[in-house]
Image (tube, coloured by chain):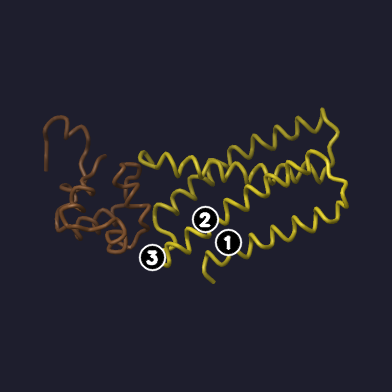
Amino acid sequence: MNNRIREYRARHNFTQEELARLVNVRRETIVFLEKNKYNPSLKLAFDLARVFSVSIETLFFMEEDEKLGIRN
Amino acid sequence: MKRSTIIFVVVSMVIITALLWLLSAQGQVNTLDLVHTGVIFLLVVFAVFLGISRVRNTRRGEPQEDELSRKLLQRAASISYYISLYIWVALLIVKDRVVIDTEQLIGSGILGMGLAFAITWAILNSRGLQHE
């Protein structure tokens, strides 16, 4: 699974610390998510999508779908 | 009580106990004792690192623990449990071949378990948990 957290964070001008506080996790967790080293829980995925005002499918996607050109 | 406070209390107790043990040895310290002291030092450094990072998170207005840190601890605990079983089996094999005190054998086992946990946590923390 891959995500567009870094892209949306840049669009909203959030620092990693600000985003971490908004979704109530540590900054390290945001770092792990952006580096694709961690798949978040459904709750955290919902919280992140809510902060960026997008759907979960927009923020998180399967690499296979990306390769096939399926973009949400 | 905050978790970071508990960590620092436990670390202080470990340091005091280790100092008492070294003082009671009265200079009769062998190689295995030195290895034990080194491992205790490494574990203390690991615990202090965890404690400081928790305090830093609190100062930044972030939670001390979150789903990733809890998952890392749980995964490290489960992996190090399996490693610990092998450590004890290895120590039992060593016991039959080398003259070693029971206290030193048990001490080696306990410190080995602690070291296995710290190393596993460090590896998971650098590699991440993408496929968990």
Question: Whole-percent x and y of residue B117?
Answer: 57, 45
Find out whether the residues at labels 2 and 1 contact each other: C-beta distance under 8 Å. Answer: yes
Check disc 1: other Cα within 10 Å, few if <14, some if 14-19, many if 20+.
Answer: some
**Chain ID at mark 3:** B
- In the rendered image, which residue does mark 2 sit on? B50
**Chain ID at mark 1:** B
Check disc 2: other Cα within 10 Å, few if <14, some if 14-19, many if 20+.
Answer: some
User: What residue is at 80 percent from the left and 53 percent from the top?
Assistant: B22
| Type of amino acid under label 1 | Ile
Question: Whole-percent x and y of residue B132?
Answer: 38, 41
User: What residue is at 60 percent from the left and 37 percent from the top?
Assistant: B83
Q: Helix, strand, or loop for circle 2?
A: helix
Q: Helix, strand, or loop for circle 1?
A: helix
Q: In the rendered image, which quarter contains the N terminus of chain A?
A: top left
Tag 2 and tag 3 share a subunit: yes
| Type of amino acid under label 2 | Leu
| Type of amino acid under label 3 | Arg
- In the rendered image, which residue does mark 3 sit on? B60
**What shade has chain A been given?**
brown
Q: Is residue B37 above or below residue B87?
A: below
User: What residue is at 74 percent from the left and 55 percent from the top?
Assistant: B18
Q: Which chain is yellow?
A: B
- Seen from this angle, which residue lies furthest bottom? B1
